[in-house]
Image (spheres, helix red, strand yellow):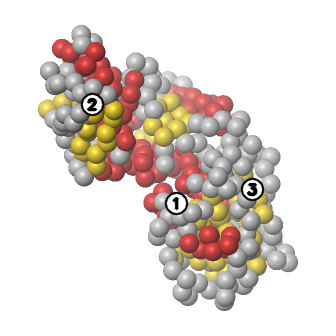
Amino acid sequence: MTNRSRLFSHRGRSLLPAAVLSRAVLLVVLCLSNSPRNGFALGQVQYVENVPHHDDFPIVQGKTAAAVYVDTNDWAGVIRAAGDLQTDVARVTGLTPAITHDGKSLGPNLIIIGTIGRSALIDQLIHEGKIDASPIAGKWESFFIQVVPDPLPGIVSALVIAGSDKRGTIYGIYDLSEEIGVSPWYWWADVAPTRQKVLFVKPGKYVQGPPSVKYRGIFLNDEAPDLSNWITNNFGTIPPGTNPPVPPGVANYNHQFYTKLFELILRLKGNYLWPAMWNNAFNEDDPLNPRLADGYGIVMGTSHQEPMLRAQKEWDRGTTPKTRMFSRISGVKASGETGIMRASSPSACAARMTRRWRKAGRKRTWRCSKKSWTFSGKSSPRK
């Protein structure tokens, strides 16, 4: 066995085979290399330093970490990523910043994180002319990071991370994490950050506009046996069942695995995933999988012969009625609609889905929990 095929060890458990990891790295590099500032911080402006200068913003200084503010009305994925920044500062400095959701007891220095139109404080700073959001407003996945003096009463200096949309803000957060020394591969490749006693952001404004490639991500191609064996070793197999039908011995590609993968994609400024499909069905194998993707802001697709987000294994296992799938056009349409509708609101529908057809003139209605979608077209009776 060569070194490339030997399993790594990560905190006492087997890790991803080196051969699989190297292929994933190559794919991500190729996908993300077209971004103006790629996910590996090569050639980009370095705005974090360890020696203070005039008008620098102190993230950590004198055993004190600047607090992090994020609005509770912002996207859940933004609030979660703000928590990652808190953890990343602690990884580098040993000091954990406080996270606050209101304007009280903020301290003289504050990191303000927010999405335009979702964060009241960001919108206030724009309205008051403290920050200019015009370089990113209305643009896809864009952000800026800016040191702002005297932004609010009682605040001497703020580091503003403002995003044009959910992923734009998340990318801004992870951009700062990488600048302070936390690699996107910190978990997957055990990349330990260099410890620092102080962290400062240089004065100025650092803008990242929209990427040149709109959808960028990872395709878990030919994941069996290497990655699937790793999944089985770390997360076991999915309990066999009949609703949905799952045979024994299926590797458990669950939300715990995808949590780490989604975070990696976002830290690399990606947004897209084709999930494991060799012997798995992303939406069925763990009902939390689609909800997790929605929360993180990952766009899910499918590969090979899997149209409309219906996994091949849904057909093989019998989830999709084989007797009418290809023999009647109504079966083909119903299968595709089910896949799209199921993915339309994973937060509401992943745990329990019910399907009902109603005739209402020339409309079809899909009901799922308290959510419903109506599509124009002639209704087809169930067969």
Percent coordinates x, y for residue 35 in the rendering: 70, 40
Give the residue drawn at x 61%, y 53%. 168
Which of discs 3 and 1 lies nearer the camera? The answer is: 3
Percent coordinates x, y for residue 240 in the rendering: 17, 34
Give the residue drawn at x 16%, y 35%. 243
- The crowd level at tag 2 (other Cα within 10 Å; few <14, some 14-19, many 20+) is few
Query: In the rendered structure, which amino acid carries the disc numbered 1?
Result: Val
Give the labeled residue for mark 3: 135
Which quadrant would residue 366 be assigned to in this image? top left
Residue 362, label in figure: 2
Residue 47, compared with residue 124, is above or below; it is: above
Query: In the rendered structure, which amino acid carries the disc numbered 2?
Result: Arg
Q: Which quarter of the rendered picture does the C terminus lie within? A: top left
Give the residue drawn at x 42%, y 48%. 294
Percent coordinates x, y for residue 176 in the rendering: 66, 60
Residue 266, compared with residue 217, is above or below; it is: below
Locate residue 63 relative to residue 262 in the image: left or right.
right
